[in-house]
Image: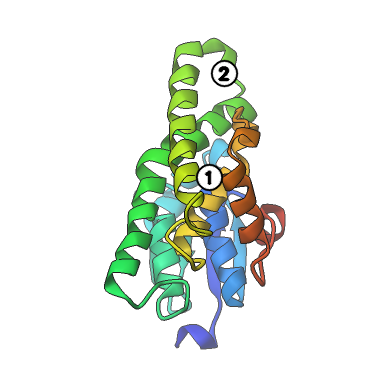
Amino acid sequence: MSESEGRFRLYGDSRSGNCYKAALMLRLLGKPFDWVETDVMARATRTTEFLAKNPNGRVPLLQLPDGRYLAESNAMLLHLAEGSRWIPQDAYQRALVYQWMFFEQYTHEPAIAVARFIVLFAKTADSQPERMKLLTDNGYAALGVMERQLGKTPFIAGDEFSVADIALYAYTHVAEEGGFELAASPAVVEWLARVEAQPGHVSMAEACR
């Protein structure tokens, strides 16, 4: 069965920016999928059944229409968008998209997403001030990198919207839930609006269901 003949199944926690990435990509592409709510805090990813699907015990997890599974949110973005306008054909421009996707996972997400989780869901920020300071400092540093780039180009990897923008949008647009003030990053705020203006864009609540 080809992907166009069946449906995707996306296992995800609707509070997660990483899960939102994959859901938003599917929505932008107009691909039908079934959302399977998977509560990380209730350890739903640690069951024997789930670990048989993804031994790493994490969401998102994408089941392709042919039954195969794919983990890691940015791998999903690249797989789903292959052949589309959201992955440049030019080798160097494509490498720039990859560059920003690696930045998102290595620098941006470990600070901004983790701070958001601690503040909004674990609610333990007051009990770990040193860790929160480190996360906050690193998060603002990541936003600073984005601010400088977006002061030069309308989208993170250049003039065109790409999967790198989806990757970074997911947690940047909810960064304030982790205590980050975006008002000091006007280029980032303007970029968020440009991403939200993309045809087919939907909110996290709309996408993850």
Left or right: 11 as drawn, with respect to 78 = right
Mark in the foreground, 1 or 2 = 2
Q: Is residue 62 above or below residue 137?
A: below
- First in residue order: circle 1 vs circle 2: 1
Q: Residue at x 69, y 56 (%)?
A: 203
Q: Secondary structure at mark 2?
A: helix
Q: Residues within 10 Å of mark 1 (few under 14, many from 20)?
A: some
- Residue 85 position within the rendered picture, expressed as x and y whole percent measured from the top left: 47, 77
For label 1, the residue is 44
Farthest-out residue, front: 152
- Residue 52 position within the rendered picture, expressed as x and y whole percent measured from the top left: 38, 56
- Residue 111 position within the rendered picture, expressed as x and y whole percent measured from the top left: 45, 33
User: Residue 179, labelled with which disc?
Assistant: none
Estimate the spatial distance between the alpha carbons at disc 1 and disc 2, rounded to whole Å. 24 Å
Q: Is residue 63 above or below residue 13?
A: below
Q: Amino acid at mark 2?
A: Ala
Q: Residues within 10 Å of mark 2 (few under 14, many from 20)?
A: some
Q: Is residue 77 above or below residue 32?
A: above
Can residue 7 be seen in the rendering of this structure?
yes
Quarter containing the N terminus = bottom left
For label 2, the residue is 125
Q: Residue at x 60, y 26 (%)?
A: 119
Q: Nearer the viewer, residue 61 or 82?
A: 82
Q: Amino acid at mark 1?
A: Ala
Farthest-out residue, right: 206
Q: Residue at x 47, y 56 (%)?
A: 156
